[in-house]
Amino acid sequence: MHKKHNFGAGPCILPPSVMEQAARAVINWRGMGLSILEVSHRSPEFEDVVLKTQLLVRELLAVPDHYSILFLQGGASTQFAMVAMNFLDTGKKAAYLDTGYFAQKAIKEARLFGEVDVFASSGDKDYTYIPVDFNYDKQVAYLHCTSNNTIEGTEMFDFPKGGAPLICDMSSDIFSREINITDFDLIYAGAQKNMGPAGMTLVIAKNEFINQAKKEIPSMMDYQIFRDNMSMYNTPPVFSIYVAMLNLLWLKDQGGVSGIEQKNIAKAKLLYAEIDRNPLFHGTADVEHRSRMNVTFLAVNKEVEAGFLKFAADQGIVGIKGYRTVGGFRASLYNALPLSSVEILVDAMATFEKEYSGKIALELE
Amino acid sequence: MHKKHNFGAGPCILPPSVMEQAARAVINWRGMGLSILEVSHRSPEFEDVVLKTQLLVRELLAVPDHYSILFLQGGASTQFAMVAMNFLDTGKKAAYLDTGYFAQKAIKEARLFGEVDVFASSGDKDYTYIPVDFNYDKQVAYLHCTSNNTIEGTEMFDFPKGGAPLICDMSSDIFSREINITDFDLIYAGAQKNMGPAGMTLVIAKNEFINQAKKEIPSMMDYQIFRDNMSMYNTPPVFSIYVAMLNLLWLKDQGGVSGIEQKNIAKAKLLYAEIDRNPLFHGTADVEHRSRMNVTFLAVNKEVEAGFLKFAADQGIVGIKGYRTVGGFRASLYNALPLSSVEILVDAMATFEKEYSGKIALELE
């Protein structure tokens, strides 16, 4: 069967070469006569994988030495609680920027641990934009934001500077564009978009910041324990880390993050141009906050929506159905999605428009 | 390269047929033209995997309908804190049976949430036995035990009955022998021994029990949220669950848990017989509490220890070095390890003994 064009929002497309290497390692890893699924996480070979993956993250995102790179489990949803458990306490306050579905989940979890000040929200316009004009109390324990809103299709291109410690959920756009790590005190990201398969979570944290965390918390929620044990306090998600390493090596070969960023800009530009041109579709997010990773758009009517979903599926395009709260379409353009897949989607939109206009014209005759 | 005989303690050996199916799914799953690593966890195909895996657990362990089957992340180490976070509180008390390294870790985490009564311990004899004669306060929130002590090589064959709700860490012997689920209120197990690859955690819990859990806890630590969302409150560890399903299908083909239990008894009997016969080695655990999963034994001296490790490695035997606190050897005989591998280890021990005795005799001449 022909390979699909996978626009899914995550777990998402990874490069074919990564899949091939991963499959080989499941049978016989490094010629050891063992599968990657049956090696000890304490073996020198796997310790080497953890170290290499850390170094690749450090190199690709230019992470300074005074930041630690950790691999955890449980996804961003666990981090929603973990950041608050570490840095918020009764009598303390944290500031949260509310930019959508996952930001709200983060807010809900933080409220279990202390006071939460939602100092700005784009909820007044269905989260179609990122608030930019805001004030917040600089004395808060930290400020939390979400760099890319997977469901709403918006992305932050500027981050608050010079205030409280900044914590950012970068699950759906990390490794897609250059960022300045020193703008942040802690970054977390579920791996299953641009880093690797589901089952691991990346944390990049300033040592000075995590040194201030609360002490009386569970070991598996303690950033310092992960740092001090090379992310191997307990059995880590071995296969997910291994595939992440393969994927980051691939990213390095693509010219690194700056190289892939140019490709991502080109892919997004092509698709948004068609959305703006094609009278059957329109985008949902404000133009200046349009996400390069998750392109959300609506059809002019239900007939076009259903018809185009089917038309696209017939051409091997999968994963473009929009999230239920937004509806319409969501095409995710993660790193591993080639420009050629976007060209096929854009061609499908144009072809569908011609056929649909022809059919309408015929009906009107 | 020839396949190894993998006696590793975990992540551990899985059946070759499972590895082959897993590798194929990484390239193209179900002929969908997509890798198992890139499918959405919300796809009907993957929802089917979760459902099938739950049903296999239910069938293989005869789990009654009033128990839920959950798939989490973070391993047993996360459960150490999670059970206490859910069921222990300030002013409440939990009873813990201390049978070794991991039991102590569970105790440490529980102490963050309430009072812990360690009512019996085998620490007086280096954890070489399981305490059987004990009393504890039946009014505690729960009683916690560890069914198999991976490091110390001991296993519980009888469980306290008719007292407080019973919580058991079964990470290293679940699916290896028949158990009566209704003896327990909650069972947890890191998957990376007899269930599947690292990266997922199995929980089997009585609904009535988890309904009593605390409410103001993080969503990702809340058993009820996992139950009410079919273990997909957030992105689950897709690949780990998929491989677990394959492995449980394999187990079913082996005659299920009762079938594999007979094979496990035979493997353990063969190895312990050689340990007891061979003058160069001796077991560390009390005979009546010897683990069928993790066979711990020592050499008569350092020369034999180092010599046999090398001799075994030359025959493709891997993973038998003992844990640093116990020393010597640990041969793990998990479900997927064939009897033929145990025969090869036993032969190696006997051959080594002959060669070593010959060498000693020569030196004495």
Image: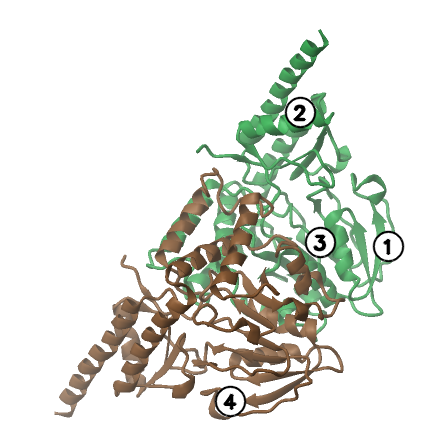
Chain colours: A green, B brown
Screen quadrant of the C terminus of chain A: top right
Q: Residues within 10 Å of mark 3 (few under 14, many from 20)?
A: some
Q: Is residue B125 left or right of residue B297?
A: right
Say if mark 2 contacts mark 4, CB within 8 Å.
no
Mark toward the start of the polypeptide (3 vs 1): 1
Q: Is residue A303 left or right of residue B60?
A: right
Percent across and percent down for residue A28 are 35, 55
Percent across and percent down for residue A308 are 63, 26
Q: Is residue A185 above or below residue A173?
A: below
Q: Which amino acid type is marked by label 3?
A: Cys
Dot 3 corresponds to which residue?
Answer: A168
Q: Secondary structure at mark 2?
A: helix
Dot 1 corresponds to which residue?
Answer: A136
The residue marked by circle 3 belongs to what chain? A
Q: Which label number is shown at residue B132?
A: 4
Q: Which amino acid type is marked by label 1?
A: Tyr
Going 40% across and 58% down the picture, which residue do you hit?
A: B250
Going 65% across and 55% down the picture, which residue do you hit?
A: B229
Mark toward the start of the polypeptide (2 vs 3): 3
Q: Secondary structure at mark 3?
A: strand
Going 72% across and 9% down the picture, which residue do you hit?
A: A364
For discs 1 and 2, the disc positioned in front in the rendered view: 2
Q: Which amino acid type is marked by label 2?
A: Glu
Distance, label 3 to label 1, CA atoms, is 16 Å
Q: Which label number is shown at residue A274?
A: 2
Screen quadrant of the N terminus of chain A: top left
Q: Which amino acid type is marked by label 4?
A: Val
